[in-house]
Each structure stands twice: as structure tokens, then as C-alpha cells.
Amino acid sequence: EKDGFPHYMAKEIHEQGAVLRSTLKGRLTEQGVDLSEELDWSGEFVRSLKQVHLVACGTSYYAALVAERVLEQWTDLDVRVDIASEYRYRQVRVTPQTLAVFVSQSGETADTLAAQRKVRSLGARCLAVTNVRGATLAREVHDRLLLKAGPEIGVAATKTFMGQMATLYLLALKLGWDRGTLNPAEAERLAAALIQLPYQVERTLEREEQVRRVAEKYSKYDNFLYLGRGISFPVALEGALKLKEISYVHAEAYAAGEMKHGPIALLEPDVPVMTVMPRDSLYEKSLSNLQEAKARRSPLVAVATDGDDLVTRHVDDVLRIPWSDEVFSPFLSVIPLQQFAYHVARFRGREIDQPRNLAKSVTVE
Ligand code: M6R
């Protein structure tokens, strides 16, 4: 059932192009996004919305952080993201104009379920983004969007992160479209770019050998700092979580601009820095963070765009991704980080599919 792969995680990483394709299928055409089979929202309801709350745990929370940035760009909604175990105990204000989105691969995470029950009783409209049709979460909410990623066996979420992002981008596109905050030409351009994504993901997956070599070189380090800015910050968080979970290597992720506010004190020659820095509007800023890390003689690795020659002058190793529009880069930049964690774990002889102390779904608080 592993299709010849040594681990489910490897198989699931490789399925990500196909996952994107099935998540987008029937929901997106060159003309736009159509979620009417799943969401029977009237135009009036969509236009009445004022806030979106995104609530989740772990990797699903990082997908929500990516979606927050996308929703801010494509809609005029007030967006807030929270960790379910925090949100459920806070004094949150919701109204019928609040769309509360619960992102959970399993649909069984105890904190996410409790958070949903709480704001539903306070009057929010609740939407589940889940991979499991019959899950408790899917049964309890008003509306649901399925990822269509297929079962994920590896404890470390990979293909479902991809599916969650794609589903949340579709939602953002719909909201931007229906509320008129995206002009039709721009919306069509974004839809066309989304349709191309599965191919770009597949081209990125083919580059695994470059990642394996870099992973071998760095597999003996015990502490990593991961950095990213803007839409790459959640990707850095996700990359660090993958490394922690399956290789048991300490990896801390920070918004690159926060480095000076503390973590820079950790830097020394045995603490590598992994920076997610596609060629985007914040690239120059990330480059200056790199220089600060270089001055502390930290080994430097960058996830960077094809054709970016400048970065090679500053770092020791580069994990290359194809060029994409800034807003879509997380779909590509997360791939080398998943593969890096996987190969470091292999070099360290770890369990990979069943890491110690972890369960696939956390059904107790
Ligand atoms: O099933 P859920 O998406 O609600 O699970 C949330 C987290 O428990 C999950 O993403 C966890 O962080 C994974 N092990 C990440 O790889």
C-alpha cells in the first residue's frame, strides 16, 4: 500500500500534485470558482459577512495562517486566526456576520471541536475544512468543505496541508469574487494560476535529490532556526514542526523580523539557519536577516527561487523552487522543507510514520 515507497510519509509527499488536482477539480475553471454544491450561501449572506475567524491546531493552524494572509489580500474582511486550545477559552466576540472556519484534517481534534461548539452557540456561522466526510466536526457545523486528499497515514501531515491550503484559497477566491473585492480580470488571472499549481508542485517534487544531499550534510546538527516573512512565515513554522516531529531535532521558527528581538542570541556555528525566501516583495528584507546570521557564522540554507543568483552569494546551500506568483509560493516552498525533515529523520534512523509520543488525531484535551 506504500506504492513502493519506504514510508507513508514519502508516498504522501509524492501525492501532493494529485491532491491539489482533486481538491480543485469541479470547483475551479478558467472562469472562476464554483462551490455551490457544498455551500448554499446566498449572495446576500456572503456580502453581509464582516469577520472571518480561522481556528485550528498544529499543521492545520499553519495552513490557517497562510489563508489569513490570502484573505486579507483578496477580500475586505476582518480576519483573525487562533489556536483552538486558546480560542476556546477566550472571550471571543462573534455575531451572525462572523464566519468561523475550523480547519482539521481528522475532524476529531478535541480542542477544535470544543471551539466550534462554543462559537456556534454564540451565533457564528461555522464552516469545517476537513479531510474526513463523516467526522464529528463535519457533522456538527453549518457548512463543510472537504480536502479530497485521501487518507493520510503518516502522523506528520503533508498532503493534507497542501489540500487545506488549496481549499482555503478557493474559499478566499469565492469570497473575494462574490463580495466584489477582486476585480473580474484579477480573479480570472488568479484562477488560471491556481489551475497551473499541480504542475508546479510536481516539478518541485522532482527535485528531491538536491534536498536529500543537503539533508545529509545537516543531519548531525541538533538545533535549527527557521525564518520566513509574510506568507513564508507560516511555511517556516510548518517546516520546523516537521523537523521536530519526525527527526526529534530542535527547530524553532520565527518571523524573520523578530530575529533581532531575541533568537539572534542563539546563533553560533553549530546552529544552522533555514530561511524561506522566494523572490517576492519581502525578499530584500530576508536577505538582510541572512547577513546578520552570517555574521554569527551560522551555516545558512535558503529555500529560494530558480534564477535567483544573488542568494547563492550569501548562503551555504540553496533548495530551489520554481518561480510562482508571491501568493502561491507556500505550495512550492513547503515541499523542500517536508523532504528535508524526512531525509534528516532517515539519516538519524527515526521511526518517521509513527514518531514517539504523537497520535494522528488528538482526541483529548
Ligand atoms: O486533525 P487535525 O488537523 O485537527 O490535527 C491537528 C494537529 O494535531 C496536526 O496537524 C499535527 O500537528 C500533525 N502531527 C502535524 O504534522
Image (cartoon, grey):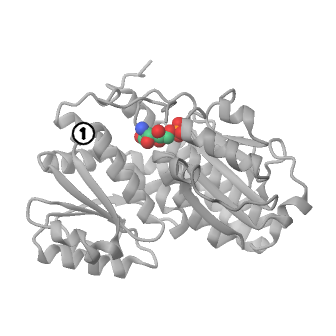
Residue located at (76% from left, 46% from top): 121
**Residue at image point 32% right, 52% down:** 240
Q: Nearer the viewer, residue 360 or 37?
A: 360
Residue 83 is situated, as x and y percent measured from the top left of the image, at: 52, 52
Residue 118's x, y, as percent? 68, 46
Helix, strand or loop at mark 1: helix
Residue topped by disc 1: 247
- Indicate left or right for 342 with 330 as reference: left
**Image location of residue 14, percent across then percent down:** 43, 37
Is 33 situated above or below 154?
below
Horizontal side, residue 135 vs residue 236: left or right: right
State the residue in front, 346 or 354: 354
Residue 178 showing in the rendered view: yes
Q: Is residue 115 above or below residue 2?
A: below
For badge 1, the amino acid type reads Ser
**Residue drawn at (68%, 30%) of the image:** 133
